[in-house]
Image (cartoon, rainbow, N blue to C red):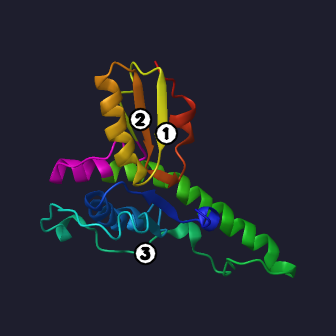
Amino acid sequence: MTGRDLGWIQLYVESNQEALDTIIQAYRIAEDQKVLLPVMVCIDGFYITHTTEWCKSRSRLTWINSFRFMNRSMLSLTPIIPWPSPGRHFRRKYGYEFLKNEAVIRGGEVIKQANDEYAAMFGRKYGNGLVEKLYCDDAEVVLVTMGSMSGNARIAIEQMRAEGWRVGLVRVRSFRPFPKPILSNFRAG
């Protein structure tokens, strides 16, 4: 999370299966002509990295695009310096930061599209790609989670639902771009 403003897309996963699926999706997202930025698949250290879990795996290489660099909006006859420097390069740095931020924002739609395409081909979908909701339609209280803690929250919510509590879960999958429009328009029950 300390790399929030690096200009990289950040997707947080709940399980090893989602990590595998998201790494495959990350190639498609990063290489899309509207984005062309690195994608970090964020995996909770120790909880996911040091546990064993069965994952479904088939040949996914045909799903990944071949990379073709064509993003003309970031190409220039004058190089853009992506680090702060004094003097005449100072303005160019902000131009670079603006273009980078615009690409991150465009990444939201690309993430949704990649999630839908992946679901159509392999049968696994993670919400809309940015956010996943569970039992939110009639919930009085909604727990917002991110990463591997979502699995435990899911179990707790299932148990509370069985006891008659109207609780829901919103799992934030994309930290960058942050799904502010989805979360700001969200209302429980």
Residue 102's place in the image compared with 128, above or below, is below
- Where does the image place residue 67, in percent across and percent down from the top left? 34, 74
Q: Split into 4 quadrants, where in the image is the N terminus?
A: bottom right
Residue 82 coordinates in the image, percent (x, y): 67, 77
Q: Is residue 129 visible?
A: no
Q: Camera-side residue: 23 or 43?
A: 43
Q: Secondary structure at mark 2?
A: strand
Q: Is residue 145 above or below residue 158?
A: below
Write down the residue under mark 1: 144
Name which residue type carries label 2.
Leu
Residue under label 2: 169
Name the foreground residue: 159 vs 95: 159
Q: Is residue 129 magenta?
A: yes
Identify the residue position indicated by label 3 in the image. Answer: 69
Residue 52: in magenta span: no
The answer to which image quadrant residue 41 occupies is bottom left
Question: Would residue 185 appear left or right of 135 to someone viewing this image?
Answer: right
Determine the CA span between mark 2 and mark 3: 39 Å
Q: Nearer the viewer, mark 2 or mark 3?
A: 2
